[in-house]
């Protein structure tokens, strides 16, 4: 089993729940003291996401009787005790957050599903400083599981951001090595542009990876190049798809369209949706602009972020079968990119995947 490391002023080693972790907390980095609730363009390009968006508790669950609220961009524990737990499993990552509380706090990593965070996973204590925000930076390696933060009255969290750190590139920007266009009477044209993008024109069509993944984190940059302002392009990223089969697996939707000038009202599920399962809660991206999509699949739980904002948080409770027939699939499968129709003109780059180890 891989050893995980967290850094502080000095290296601390702990063994917990059969996961070896080392943790570092770096004091007082030069982040702004006030809450922003947003990522910079540079952070988005680097792959940072927001587990807490500063607006809602979307993507979090509670264990115990703690009561929470959102106030001034912070997640506040009003009363009771227990844990705040992410609904998504993470593996290798850097986590930054700001913490304020009178009492000490505890952050647990690598917590198995349905486990008690006080008994399993690795833990780091954060000293309480009444009325003072603290910057906390942690790094985890080899620790698959949920992130849990112990609740205490008046505890506040804000600016919670996370960057996956162990993804490997699966597109070299030079040719289609490792990728295979689906054969048949499909008009999509697949090419690599001089500036290193995978381009899909026309459609329908499907280009698939030769490699397969079961549980993973995938990040990629996407642009829908569209000269027609009256029409929005359509595409998708399929995952856990059966090799050689057309438009199979789950689909992270690509469609930057919304109704009534309201980005919380997506058309056709919207970019970042789990297509035909859960609509995107907000259409973050726009035509003719690069954006970054993050997809995490762990067991029967699927989650997506667009430009760091979580757009879907879906648990598939359907019986096993083909996702295209509204069934669940937890087996490994290929990733594929969709050419949708004759208007398709999609660009993809910086495509990388981290394979998760088997979970408990």
Image (spheres, rainbow, N blue to C red):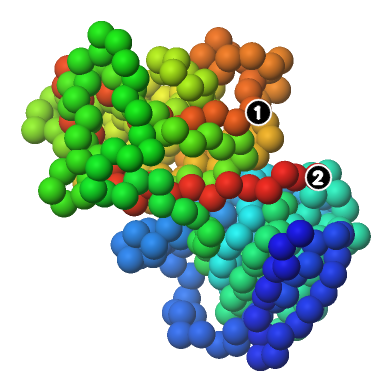
Residue at the extreme right of the image, as rendered = 119
User: Label 2 crowding class (10 Å Cα cut-off): few <14, some 14-19, many 20+?
Assistant: few
Which quarter of the figure has residue 149? bottom right
Q: Are marks 1 and 2 in contact (CB under 8 Å)?
A: no
Q: Is 195 on the left or on the right of 141, as rendered?
A: left
Is residue 247 something one can see in this rendering? yes
Which numbered marker is on residue 360? Answer: 2
Which quarter of the figure has residue 277? top right
The spot of residue 77 in percent (x, y) is 73, 61
Vertically, is 144 above or below 133?
above
| Residue closer to the observer: 309 or 88 | 88
Marks counted in the figure total 2
Q: Quadrant location of the N terminus?
A: bottom right
| Residue closer to the observer: 330 or 41 | 330
Residue at the extreme left of the image, as rendered = 227
The spot of residue 15 in percent (x, y) is 84, 70
The spot of residue 303 in percent (x, y) is 56, 39
Vertically, is 202 above or below 161?
above
Residue beneath the point at 62% across and 73% down: 138
User: Label 1 crowding class (10 Å Cα cut-off): few <14, some 14-19, many 20+?
Assistant: some
Measure how far apart labels 1 and 2 are at the Cα level: 14 Å
The spot of residue 252 in percent (x, y) is 44, 31
The residue indicated by pointer 1 is: 330
Q: Is 178 on the left or on the right of 232, as rendered?
A: right
Q: Is 204 on the left or on the right of 297, as rendered?
A: left
Q: Earlier in the sequence, mark 1 or mark 2?
A: 1
């Amino acid at each position: 089993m891989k050893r995980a490391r967290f850094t502080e002023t000095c290296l601390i080693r702990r063994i917990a729940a059969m996961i070896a972790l080392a943790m570092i907390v770096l004091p007082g980095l030069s982040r702004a003291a006030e809450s922003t609730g947003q990522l910079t363009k540079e952070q988005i390009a680097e792959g940072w996401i927001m587990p807490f968006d500063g607006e809602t508790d979307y993507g979090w669950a509670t264990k115990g009787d703690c009561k929470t609220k959102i106030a001034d961009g912070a997640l506040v524990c009003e009363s009771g005790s227990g844990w705040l737990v992410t609904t998504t499993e993470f593996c290798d990552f850097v986590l930054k957050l700001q913490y304020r509380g009178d009492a000490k706090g505890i952050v647990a990593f690598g917590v198995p599903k349905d486990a008690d965070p006080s008994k399993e996973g690795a833990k780091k204590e954060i000293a309480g400083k009444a009325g003072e925000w603290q910057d906390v930076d942690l790094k985890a390696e080899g620790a698959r599981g949920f992130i849990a933060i112990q609740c205490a009255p008046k505890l506040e969290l804000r600016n919670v951001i996370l960057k996956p750190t162990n993804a490997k590139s699966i597109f070299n920007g030079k040719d289609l090595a490792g990728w295979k266009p689906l054969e048949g009477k499909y008009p999509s044209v697949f090419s690599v542009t001089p500036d290193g993008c995978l381009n899909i024109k026309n459609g329908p069509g499907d280009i698939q990876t030769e490699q397969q993944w079961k549980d993973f984190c995938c990040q990629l940059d996407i642009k829908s190049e569209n000269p027609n302002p009256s029409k929005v392009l359509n595409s998708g990223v399929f995952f856990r798809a059966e090799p050689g089969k057309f438009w199979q697996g789950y689909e992270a939707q690509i469609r930057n369209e919304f109704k009534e000038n309201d980005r919380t009202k997506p058309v056709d599920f919207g970019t970042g949706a789990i297509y035909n399962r859960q609509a995107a809660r907000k259409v973050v991206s726009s035509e003719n602009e690069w954006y970054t999509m993050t997809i995490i699949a762990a067991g029967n739980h699927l989650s997506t972020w667009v430009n760091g904002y979580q757009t879907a948080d879906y648990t598939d409770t359907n019986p096993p079968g083909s996702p295209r027939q509204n069934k669940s699939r937890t087996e490994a499968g290929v990733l594929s990119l969709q050419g949708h129709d004759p208007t398709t003109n999609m660009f993809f780059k910086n495509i990388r995947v981290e394979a998760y180890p088997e979970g408990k």
